[in-house]
Image (spheres, rainbow, N blue to C red):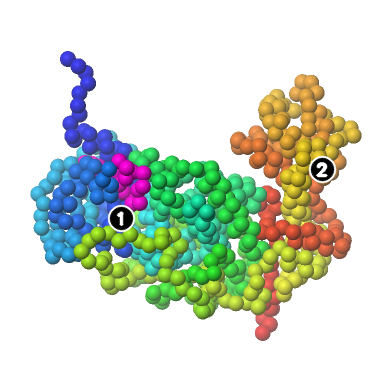
Amino acid sequence: MGVIRLLDTHTVNQIAAGEVVERPASIVKELMENALDAGATRIDVHLTDGGRQLIRIVDNGCGMSPEDAALCIERHATSKIGSAEDLMAIETLGFRGEALPSIASVSRMEFTTRRHCDSQGTRLRVEGGERQPVETVGAPPGTTIQVEDLFYNTPARRKFLRSSTAEGSACAEVIWRLALAHPHVAVSLTQGRQVTFRSPGNNKTLETLSAVYGREVIPHLLALSHKSSEGWELNGFIGEPSLNRANRNHQTWFINQRWVRSRSLSLAVEEVYQGLLPVHRFPFFVLNLLLPPHKVDVNAHPTKQEIKIDQERDICEFIQSVLKETLRSRALSRPLWTREGSSQPALSSAYNSQSSLTPDKTIKDRPSLNNVAKMTPLWTDSIEPSPKPETSGVYQEPNRGRSDAIIGERVQKNTGDSPEKSTDHNGLEAATNTINDITKTDSKEISKGLFDKTSYPSPQYCVETESPEKYPGNTIVAESLPCSEDLPKSPLYDVPLKAAMVAEWIPIGQFQRSYILAEGQGALYLIDQHAAHERVLYYALKEKLEQAIDVEQSCQQLLIPVTVTLTPAEFDAVIERISDLRDAGIIMEHFGGNTLLIRAVPLGLPPGEEEGLLRDIIDRIQGGAKLKKEDLCREALSSLACRGAVKAGQTMSHPEMVALLQQVARLEGMDTCPHGRPYLLRIDRSELEHRFHRS
C-alpha cells in the first residue's frame, strides 16, 4: 500500500489558511481590499482584543446577490478574473478568491450583504469551514463581515499570536496605509470602545496624511508628480532632509494604489538622500507608482505584499531622477523658531494647483493656543511627532501626532467618558501654530486626491453607492492643513529662498569663531562655517572626479609616500577594496606585513591628513555596511571634504566669509553637509520684532 494520500477538504483549507491568514492584520487587509474593490466610500473597522476575539468590517460597497453570497466562500470563487491571461493585467486589489474560505476555515465568520437594488439582504454564517443555512434579513446596502475567535480550532497557531496591543498595532498599520492609498474613502478604526483613527474621506491627500502622521509634518513635505515617456507615473510626498526617522517605518510605497513592500524601490529613494541625512537616519516618504498592469506581477507572494516589476532598474532610475529634481528645487534654510504668526516654510509642490484644504467641520474643542511659550527654539535634528499620553488597554498609534488625540477627545465627550489630559503641549502648540497661520487664498481647487487614478472604476451594480455624507451619525472630522497655495503670502517669502540669493548676503561677523552671521532678504542667517565649507569642498571634489579622464588627473602624487600600519582585519578590508579606493583617488601599494604605502591622495587634502583619511574610510568599510563602489567613493570624498574644510574655532576674515557665501550660492537644493548636518538657519525680522514686542 502506498504512503501518498489525498488530503481531505478541511485539511486543505487549513493549509491554505496558513498562507493567507497569518494574524488578525492579514484578515483586516484582505477584507478591506475586498471592500475597496466593491467601490466602498466608507469602511468602518471594529476590533476587540486586538482582533483576536472580534474583527468587524462594515462597508457601503456594491454588496452581493444571494447567489453570489453562497458561492463566495468556495475556494477560488472570484469575480475579479476569468482566465489565466487575466493574471497579467490585474487592476483590482484581490483576485484569487482565497480570502473568505481561508478565513472561514479558522474562525467563526458571519457576513451580511445587500445590493442597493435589493429590498432584503443575505446572511451567511460559517464556523470552522462548516456552512450554516443562508438567511434572508433586513440590512443596509453594502457588506458587513464579522470574524470571531480567530484560530479557535487550531490552538497551536493561536498560542503564537502576540499581545492584544501588538496585534492591534499591526491591524492599525494596515488600515492607515490603505487609507493613504485611497483618500476618497472614509476609514475609521474602533478598538474596544474608543475610535483610534479616522480619515476624512474627502479625497484630499494632505488631510489624510495629517490624520495618519500628525499635522506637524505637513510643512516639511515636498509634493511631486511626474510622468515618463514610457507611461510610468510617480506622485506623492517626500520629506525634506530635516524630516527624517530612525527606521523605515515611515516609508510607504504604493504601486497602482496597492500597498507593497519593495526593498529595491526604498533603497533607490535612500540613495538620493545620501549625504543629506545624518548617519543611521532614513527619509520620510509616501509615494505611489503607476505602472501598466502587465509590468507588475502581483501574484508572486501569498499576501500580495511582495511583487515583481518588469524593468525594475530603469524604473528605479526614473524614480531617482524625479526625487533629485524635487530636492534640488526646494527652498533652502529652516526657521530657528516656530510660533503663532511667524512665517513658515511653504510646502514645496510640483503642482500649480492643489486641493484647498478646508475642513468639512471645524473641531470646536481645539486646545487653546494663547499660552505659547515665549521662546520655543527648534533644536531637534529632525521633526518628531509629539508624545501622546498612554491609554491603558487601548492601542495608540505613536506616530500620528495630535490629530487622533483631538478626535479621541470628541468621541470620549460624546460617550460621557473623561479624556486623559496630556502633560506635554509644546509639540502640539508648535505644530498647531504652523497650521493656524494659514489663510485662504484664491487657489485653484482640484477634486482628485494625489494618489487617484484617472478615474475610479465603478463596480457594476444597480444604483450608485451612497456617499459618506448620507451617514450623518458618523461625521468625519478633519483639520485644516496647509498646501503651497494656502500659506500666507509674506513679502519676504513670495519667492522661496534659493541658493543664488546667498551671494547677496552681507556677512556681519562670527559667533564663537564657529558660526557666520549674515543678513539678507530681510532676515538674519546663521551658517555653520565648517559644515558649509565641507559641502562646498565635497561639491568641488565630486565635480573634479566626474570630469577627470583617468585617476591620475583627480589625485596628487605625494613627494614622500606615507606608510600606514594596520591590524590584520583592517589590512584585509583595505586589500579587498583597494581597486575601488584607487578609483576614489587613493593610490596605495603593499609595503610588507600589514603595512601599506600611500603614494597619492585626492586633490585638496591638506598635508598630514593622509593616514586619517584612510582610517576614516576603513571605519566605514568595517562598520558592517556593504558599500558599493559608488558609496565608497562618496565616503572617501566626504571624509576628504571634512578634513579639508575650515574648522570650528578658526577665525575667518570678512573676505573669507564673503568668498564662502559666494561658493555656497552654487549649491542649489543643498543645506546640509555631506554627513547630513544642517549648516543654515534663519531668523526672520518679523520674528525678532515679535520677540522684542515691537509693533
Specify the amino acid type for callout 1: Asp
Q: Amino acid at mark 2?
A: Leu
Which quadrant does the C terminus fall into? bottom right
Q: Quadrant of residue 157?
A: top left
Residue ranking furthest to the right: 559
| Mark 1 Cα-neighbour bin, 10 Å: few <14, some 14–19, many ≥20 | many
Disc 1 from disc 2: Cα separation: 60 Å
Q: Which residue does the numbered mark 1 point to in the structure image? A: 37
Marks counted in the figure total 2
Outermost residue on the front side: it is 229
Is 588 situated left or right of 283 in this image? Answer: right
Task: Give the magenta part as a residue range.
Answer: 84-106
Q: Which mark is residue 603?
A: 2
Q: Quadrant of the N terminus?
A: top left
Indicate whether 511 appears above or below 229. Answer: below
Q: Residue at x 26, y 62 (%)?
A: 60
Residue 276: x and y in percent read: 64, 52
Q: Position of residue 671 (x, y in %)?
A: 68, 58
Asked if residue 85 lies in the magenta stretch, the reply is yes
User: Toward the viewer: 86 or 189?
Assistant: 86
Instruction: Report x, y in % for residue 575.
Output: 71, 27
**Which residue is pictured at 43% across the width and 64% down the height?**
449
Q: Secondary structure at mark 1?
A: helix
* Residue at 80%, 23% in the rendered image: 591
Is residue 235 magenta-colored? no
Q: Earlier in the sequence, mark 1 or mark 2?
A: 1
Q: Residues within 10 Å of mark 2 (few under 14, many from 20)?
A: some
**On the picture, is 646 further left or further right than 344?**
right
